[in-house]
Image (tube, rainbow, N blue to C red):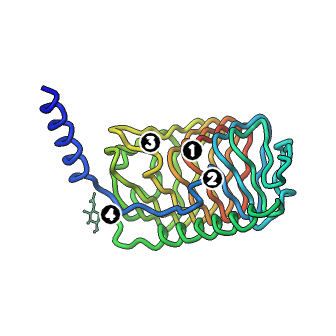
Amino acid sequence: MLANIVYIALGLLSVDSAFATGPSAVNLGTAAGFTILAEAGISTVPPSAITGNIGVSPIAAIALTGFSLTADPSGTFSTSNQVVGKVFAASYTSPTPSQLTTAVSDMSTAFTDATGRVNPNFTNLNDGEIGLLTLTPGLYKWTGGVTAATGFTISGLVTDTWIFQIAGTLTLSAAVQATLSGGALAKNIIWVVSGSVDLGAGSHLEGVVLAKTAITAQTGTSVNGRLLSQTNVALQVATIVA
Ligand SMILES: *[C@@H]1O[C@H](CO)[C@@H](O)[C@H](O)[C@H]1NC(C)=O
């Protein structure tokens, strides 16, 4: 009986992976140790709620605003009542600066990898308006911006992957909700955005955002994933969970 259950479970696992679809994973390297990583600054209008570490580099700690930081005696990190995790900046004590340099480099490598993937399964799908769509696994490419005026669904198995390449901006209208179905996981969803990212008030996004420029999470936004920006991340009473 037990043997049968194990056999069936193994069978399901192998079926699962055999049918996994979508592009190969994007390696975030040590950037995966951060819920938010930004090169030019992170601001918050309190109270935001972040689960996981955040960091800025090469900019110094002065570019962390609104966090009411408390320095750890070690000097290598600080804490904030808005962050369940550690807060890092390039101006902190060694080894933090070199670790951040590596994480930022890994973030840049991940952006280049994700944005460089070729042979998309979908090109300029629905002219960039993804509201009401169900997005199955694959590589998606938009040569302009992407908007969601209404909610959308990302549907696939736990092993499936998505890369959304967006050459323009990514804009979620207020209250728009991204929903996962079928077992899809936020860690397998990459939004690689060359323009700015604007998450409207009360909106919800799932996935890892690799942004070339700024990410703004307006009042009441929530994100299940990571915000990794080559410039700034601005939070307004936002909830970000890795
Ligand atoms: C996406 O495109 C790749 C490369 O052309 C192909 O191997 C794969 O089967 C496609 N996936 C889907 C879900 O259509």
Horizontal placement of 10 versus 33: left or right?
left
Residue 220's quadrant in the figure?
top right
Question: Measured from the top left, where is residue 136 in percent x and y?
Answer: 33, 50
Label 2 belongs to which residue? 34
Label 4 belongs to which residue? 121
Question: Measured from the top left, where is residue 194 in percent x and y?
Answer: 58, 66
Given this view, does label 3 or label 1 mark the residue nearer the observer? 1
Q: Secondary structure at mark 1?
A: loop
Type of amino acid at the residue the image marks with label 3: Phe
Circles 2 and 1: CB atoms closer than 8 Å: yes
Quote the CA–CA distance across marks 1 and 4: 27 Å
Chain-order first, disc 3 or disc 4: 4
**Image vertical order of residue 80 relative to residue 61, above or below:** above
Q: Which mark is residue 242?
A: 1
Where, quadrant-wise, is the C terminus in this rendering?
top right
Chain-order first, disc 2 or disc 3: 2
Residue 105's quadrant in the figure?
bottom right
Q: Which mark is residue 152?
A: 3
Residue at horizontal 37 percent and vertical 54 percent from the top: 161
Q: Which mark is residue 64?
A: none
Chain-order first, disc 1 or disc 4: 4
Given this view, does label 2 or label 4 mark the residue nearer the observer? 2
Type of amino acid at the residue the image marks with label 2: Phe
Residue at horizontal 34 percent and vertical 71 percent from the top: 119
Q: Is mark 4 within 8 Å of ligand 1?
A: yes
Q: Secondary structure at mark 4?
A: loop
Mark 4: give few (<14), some (14-19) or many (20+) Cα within 10 Å: few
Question: Measured from the top left, where is residue 43 in percent x and y?
Answer: 78, 49
Of 142 and 17, nearer the camera is: 17
Quote the CA–CA distance across marks 3 and 1: 20 Å
